[in-house]
Amino acid sequence: MAAKKLAIVLPAYNEKEVIEKTTAELHKLLNEMVLSDKISAESFILYVDDGSKDNTWALVNALNEKYGNVFGLRFSANFGHQNALIAGMTHLTDTDVDYVVTIDADLQDDPQAIVEMVDLANQGKDIIYGVRNDRTSDTFFKRFTAQSFYKVMSALGVNSIPNHADFRLVNQKVLRAFSAYQEREMFLRGIFPLIGFNEAKVYYARAEREAGETKYPLRKMIKFAATGITSFSISPITFVRNVGLGIFGISILSLIYIVIGWAFGRTSAGWPTLMVSIWMLGGLQLVAIGIIGEYIGKIFLEVKHRPRYIIAEKIGE
Ligand code: UDP
Ligand code: MG
């Protein structure tokens, strides 16, 4: 069996502080795997520059000259982490690349796990998920929010893999299957488990960011979580409907109570209850409208069918 061709895809947004170190490390790793015959010598690294405002792209060019097996795609603007991953994978679909590994440019996910992933792929696995078994390097806040997110997702019936981010290996078969998923707002972690095939997991400890700072501030994290939930589940709407029905039932009961009281000549001051009901109903209605609006917004985004990203420049094929 001929050794398989591996491509490592890294999204990079303003990563000038880490990109050289990352490349050196991955280049070394690729060489080791080539020498031990796990992958072919044509294996390479592909950066997807997500519209960086620093000199990340200039560095990718320099790295291409230095190593030869480093290539790049540059977006015309910042289209986001998920779209950068999609662009890298789409670019390699139906090519002679056998395996694609996606990993963050800051190497918080242990590159050594790639060796294990490749071994499993060579044994016939199609998707191999990298799963963090130690997040002590993340802040308490990040761990807490991440844990709550996985809990909410699974409570809503979304099949995602806890503690798996976008560090995974997929083979050409999976890439082709993936290309049929065409929604604009993608949440990759929810999509891949749907694709099926033969899957495996590789465990690793998550390290600190090598350099630079997180490109995922709280604001982006919340947006990402909301996308994940509303892209895969309509249970928030169902929940709102059920609460609405419950409240409607209670109001009917109280109406009956009031009418009976009135028939027996009992009139109440009623002011506090009135205020409470108005505020409560008003609030609930706003929440409900908000949730429904969120889904309508999603439909709006999808029907526009805009491109998910625009590639401005390429290095390599
Ligand atoms: N990233 C990107 N576009 C963005 C934000 C982030 O391509 O708009 C990349 C970033 O360069 C990194 C990866 O996505 O390679 C993960 O980002 P980061 O490490 O900042 O997130 P964290 O690990 O803190 O969640
Ligand atoms: Mg990171």
Image (spheres, grey):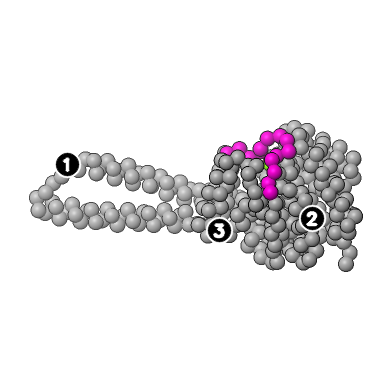
Tell me the mark number nearer the camera, choosing from 3 and 2.
Answer: 2
- Rounded to the nearest whole Å, what is the CA distance between mark 3 and mark 1? 48 Å
Q: Amino acid at mark 1?
A: Ala
Tag 1 and tag 2, C-beta contact below 8 Å: no
Task: Say what secondary structure mark 3 lies in.
Answer: loop
Residue drawn at (71%, 47%) of the image: 109
Tell me the mark number nearer the camera, choosing from 1 and 2.
Answer: 2
The quadrant the N terminus occupies is bottom right
Q: Is residue 211 magenta?
A: yes
Residue 234 x %, y %: 50, 57
The rendered magenta stretch, by its main secondary structure, is classed as: loop
Question: Is residue 170 at all visible to an observer of this figure?
Answer: yes
Of the residues under marks 3 and 2, which one precedes in the sequence? 2
Question: Is residue 309 at all visible to an observer of this figure?
Answer: no
Residue 176 x %, y %: 74, 62
Of the residues under marks 1 and 2, which one precedes in the sequence? 2
Dot 1 corresponds to which residue?
A: 269
Residue 150 x %, y %: 56, 52
Q: Which mark is on residue 158? A: 3
Q: Amino acid at mark 3?
A: Val
| Crowd band around label 3 with a 10 angstrom C-alpha radius: few (<14), some (14–19), many (20+) | many
Tag 3 and tag 1, C-beta contact below 8 Å: no
The magenta segment: 205-218
Q: Amino acid at mark 2?
A: Val
Q: Is residue 167 above or below residue 271?
A: below
Residue drawn at (56%, 40%) of the image: 141
**Residue furthest out toward the left:** 265
Dot 2 corresponds to which residue?
A: 115
Tell me the mark number nearer the camera, choosing from 3 and 1.
Answer: 3
Rendered image quadrant of residue 178: bottom right
| Crowd band around label 2 with a 10 angstrom C-alpha radius: few (<14), some (14–19), many (20+) | some
